[in-house]
Amino acid sequence: MTDSTSETGPLHHLARTHLPADLAERWTGLLRPAARLLATPEPGPGDVVVGRLGGLPALPENEEWPVWEGHGPLSFVASVDCAALPAHALDIPLPTEGTLSFFYFDGQIDDGDALVWPKDPDTWAGSRVVYVPAGVAVVERALPVVDDEDVEFEAYPEVPLTARVEWTAPDAWHPDFLAALRRDGHAADPAGGHPEEAQAFVEALWDRERRADHLVGGHANPVQSPVDYEIAHAYLGKDGDEVTWSDPRVAEEARKWTLLAQIDSDDDADMMWGDCGALYWLIRPEDLAALRFDRALFTMQCC
């Protein structure tokens, strides 16, 4: 496990190279540490395995395999061993022991007919985070039997995960990113683009090699719009209220949510979320500290 969160890391270097000193200091103040989960099909002797993509979940005997009532069982996506994660290096109150498992109704059973969307509370049961405290006896579960001979419900190939601590930044179109690069400190309409003096910096960020983004904590890497704003907009409208994206409550609510985990499309695990998309679970820090993973919200974004 490596730690890339020194203030001489690549993101700090890019900012100091391409931005005026005052803007570089403001922008680097947005950076947050994350545990980047690295698919490691063949871990070496010095690798610390912190979790896995795919395979079969290990659950307590009295824990039912997560099911979306009326639709079917959820697919097991990933699990992480909290004791093996570098929780001390993160800025979220992650448990220091126990296991987190992530499930999602991925469309295998209904050929993608039912979608899980944060703006539709009736679909929230299509994702689940299961926390198993340390010391609780678990057994590896076989796949549930789907009573439809035309359906092949399969597990994803199991791929071990190692971890590296890295700084993460908001997306280039996130309001906080836009505000940090403006002299007045106010977020501009994304349609207006970035200030001229920041163009070289933004282009340098875009030129960085994109890897599969499996993350615990830190800033989400959205495929489309800022994930925290998507969750905030959906949460405010969960009771049927009409909420516009320009409503100031959306920005206020977005600050109350933090990324718990992001699982990207991954060739090693045969995972493809839509068209090269990613899965995101967000949670309020106070719910995370209280182990209320039932209050985590989910979204999926794809190209």
Image (tube, rainbow, N blue to C red):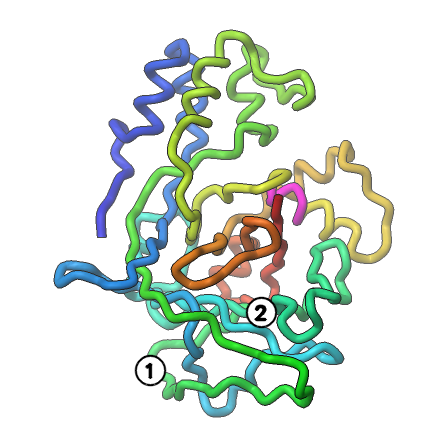
Whichever of labels 1 and 2 marks the residue nearer the N terminus, that label is 2
In terms of depth relative to the viewer, which is nearer, 50 or 131?
Answer: 50
**Residue occupying image coordinates x 26% and y 39%:** 4
Which quadrant is the C terminus positioned in?
Answer: top right
* Quarter occupied by residue 287: bottom right
Q: Position of residue 90 (x, y in %)?
A: 36, 48
Q: Which residue is mark 2?
A: 128
**Residue occupying image coordinates x 54% and y 69%:** 103
Which numbered mark, 1 or 2, is in the foreground of this view?
Answer: 2
Specify the segment rendered in magenta: 227-231
Label drawn at residue 261: none
Would residue 188 appear left or right of 78 to someone viewing this image?
right
Q: Relative to 38, does residue 17 appear above or below in the rendering?
A: above
Would residue 121 appear left or right of 182 to someone viewing this image?
right
* Quarter occupied by residue 105: bottom right
Badge 2: how crowded within 10 Å, few (<14), some, or many (20+)? Answer: many
In terms of depth relative to the viewer, which is nearer, 228 or 142?
Answer: 142
Q: Residue furthest front?
A: 150
> Does 230 lie within the magenta span?
yes
Q: Amino acid at mark 1?
A: Gly
Circle 1 SS class: loop
Label drawn at residue 135: 1
Q: Position of residue 29 (x, y in %)?
A: 42, 28
The residues bearing labels 1 and 2 have C-alpha atoms spaced at a distance of 21 Å
* Residue 73 seen in the current view: yes
In terms of depth relative to the viewer, which is nearer, 143 or 280?
Answer: 143
Would residue 35 appear left or right of 30 to someone viewing this image?
left
Q: Position of residue 73 (x, y in %)?
A: 62, 79
Q: Position of residue 55 (x, y in %)?
A: 41, 75
* Residue 262 seen in the current view: no
Circle 2 SS class: strand
